[in-house]
Image (tube, rainbow, N blue to C red):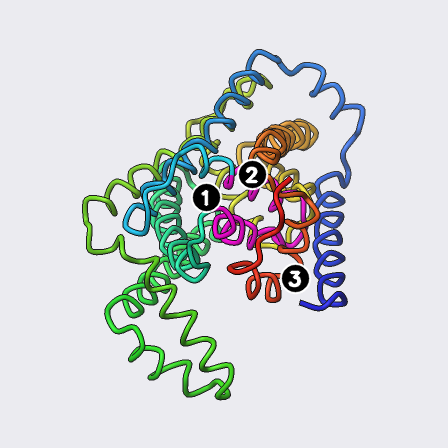
Amino acid sequence: MNRRRTTSKIAVGCIVGVGCLWLALRKVSLGEVATALHGFDARYLIAAVAVSLTIQVFRAWRWQIELTPLRRLPFSLLWQVVSVAYMMINVLPFRLGEPVRPILLSWKTGLPIPAIVGNWVFEKMMDAAALVLIIHLTLVMSDLPPWAHRASGVSLATFLVLLTFVGAVWLRGERFFDATLARLLPAPACARTRAVLLGARDGLQILPDHRLVACVFLVTLVLWTLPILSSWLLLRGFGLTLPLAAPFVIFVCIGLGTALPNPPGMFGVFQIAAVVALGLFNVHKSEAVAYGIVLNAVQFFTLVAQGLVALPLVGVGLGALTRAAVDESETIGACETRPPATR
């Protein structure tokens, strides 16, 4: 990825964040937002932070289960890698931190990156399945506008596309590639892509083990229930006695917001998502903005705090991780043979 393209992505992410924040604060009295923040019950903040910290534990546990067919890895290592990776995803705009997780795990264990990426695709399929269930449960619990129903269709389509892709790669492998992408790619790119695809297939070795797949899905459901619980706790902290559907709607709106080119820390996206979601329950816009600020802060600072704790443990500096994230094509090509020196 060249510098100009990276700079463009950073700029787009920041513009999206500023735009979302402007929309959230438009026609809002900052004095009323301050009043709402002042009236927040901090006891609920402690509980919400505890729940948010637990999310990373479940992410690491789920990943440990997913990687079992490849290698049995210690939970502590996976928590460190997950914590650092999600810190980078939140700090860097436009999700430029996404490559950190497979690269860092490969550096620490020697596992090939394509296999880790294949495992990542399976994980995204599980996420999509859980989100489909949560979104449809939300639609059952509340009378939402037409755009929410369209969003449910998009989530279902995403899950079906991932399911089809994963099934085709696992069942047909090289034949699937030769019948599809190989016909479109030039010869050099075709050879590289075929090698990556076949390597990624190793990351799908969990599929024949139905017990492990079911276990991953159950952990995924619990994992995605935790941010909903955190949202509900913060609603209580603001004294908002809303239906049970409210935190589900907030979760769905934030999930849709993450599809945008995100700014650092998702600033702006959380606020506009809170305004849209709570507006459906007739919550005043200034209270919704205050809620979005606190929810965003809990999510951001718990992720960054865990990442900073884990960073010395993985023994890789922020500079190396940032270069790996921003220049992923060159780093991935070299990381299997030349990991950075540990500190």
**Front-most of 33 and 204?**
204
| Element carrying mark 3 | loop
Q: Amino acid at mark 1?
A: Leu
| Element carrying mark 1 | loop
Give the quadrant of residue 264: top right
277 in relation to 201, above or below: above
**In 3D space, how far apart are the residues under numbered discs 3 and 1 (Cα atoms)?**
42 Å
Circle 1 Cα neighbour tier, 10 Å, few/some/many (<14 / 14–19 / ≥20): some
The quadrant of the rendering that contains the C terminus is top right
**In 3D space, how far apart are the residues under numbered discs 2 and 3 (Cα atoms)?**
20 Å
Circle 3 Cα neighbour tier, 10 Å, few/some/many (<14 / 14–19 / ≥20): some
Residue picked out by circle 1: 144
Range covered by the magenta-colored residues: 81-108
Q: Amino acid at mark 2?
A: Val
Residue 29 shown left or right of residue 295 in the figure: right
The secondary structure making up most of the magenta span is helix
